[in-house]
Amino acid sequence: MSEKTYNVLFLCTGNSARSIMAEALLNGADVGRFRAFSAGSHPAGAVNPFALEQIAAIGYTPGDLRSKSWDEFATADAPVMDFVITVCDKAAGEVCPFWPGQPVTAHWGFRDPAAALGSTSDIRHEFATVCREIKTRLDIFRSLPLEKLDKLALKREMDKIGEVQP
């Protein structure tokens, strides 16, 4: 009997930093158990180079990461999501498309490292901090016995993860 692969969609407004880092970190950490995607309501059109630096620094290959619209995941031929997680407050407050399959939804708010001001070193530090915070929540998420929890229990656990103070 093979273990189910869970599809996870990370949403952010611009899909250039937080959601991209979450996609890469989950895909790199749990090959086979999860298949992560990311998208934005108003995609920036490019991945932030500081996000790519963080992904590479942690040892994950950036691969084919790109900034894309969440509309790509609301089509009939899109992968059916098991989880949809917003990672920025703006995306959490927007009206999302209909997601087929009734995925478990959660909000994990993170500061926007792309809004960081200061020197290049300051900005890199902010990206590193947020990347570690995302990784911490993903580690908790990955430890959940998903196959043993019903949707309501999963929703409660996902909400708890969103409350974790990194």
Image (cartoon, helix red, strand yellow):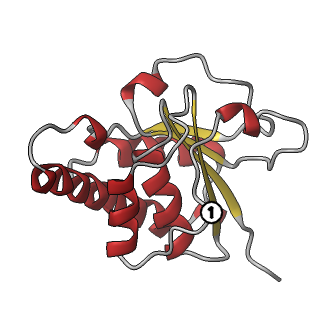
Visible residue check, residue 118: yes
Locate residue 125 relative to residue 43 in the image: left or right.
Answer: left
Where residue 110 appears, x then y in whole percent? 31, 40
Residue at image point 10% right, 51% down: 122
Q: Is 113 placed above or below 133 here?
A: above
Locate residue 16 relative to residue 49 in the image: left or right.
Answer: right
Numbered marks: total: 1
Residue most extreme to the bottom: 1
Q: Quadrant of residue 137?
A: bottom left
Where residue 125 appears, x then y in whole percent? 15, 56
Residue for badge 1: 64
Q: Is 73 placed above or below 51 here?
A: above
Residue at image point 26% right, 52% down: 130
Where residue 75 appears, x then y in whole percent? 84, 35
Q: Amino acid at mark 1?
A: Asp
Q: Is 129 placed above or below 31 here?
A: above
Closer to us: 61 or 3: 61
Locate residue 65 relative to residue 71 in the image: left or right.
Answer: left
What is the secondary structure assignment of the residue under circle 1?
loop
Residue most extreme to the right: 76
Closer to us: 68 or 46: 46
Visible residue check, residue 157: no
Residue at image point 34% right, 65% down: 53
Residue at image point 15% right, 52% down: 120
Closer to us: 116 or 101: 116
Badge 1 local density, few (<14 within 10 Å), some, or many (20+)? Answer: few
Q: Quadrant of the N terminus?
A: bottom right
Where residue 74 appears, x then y in whole percent? 77, 33
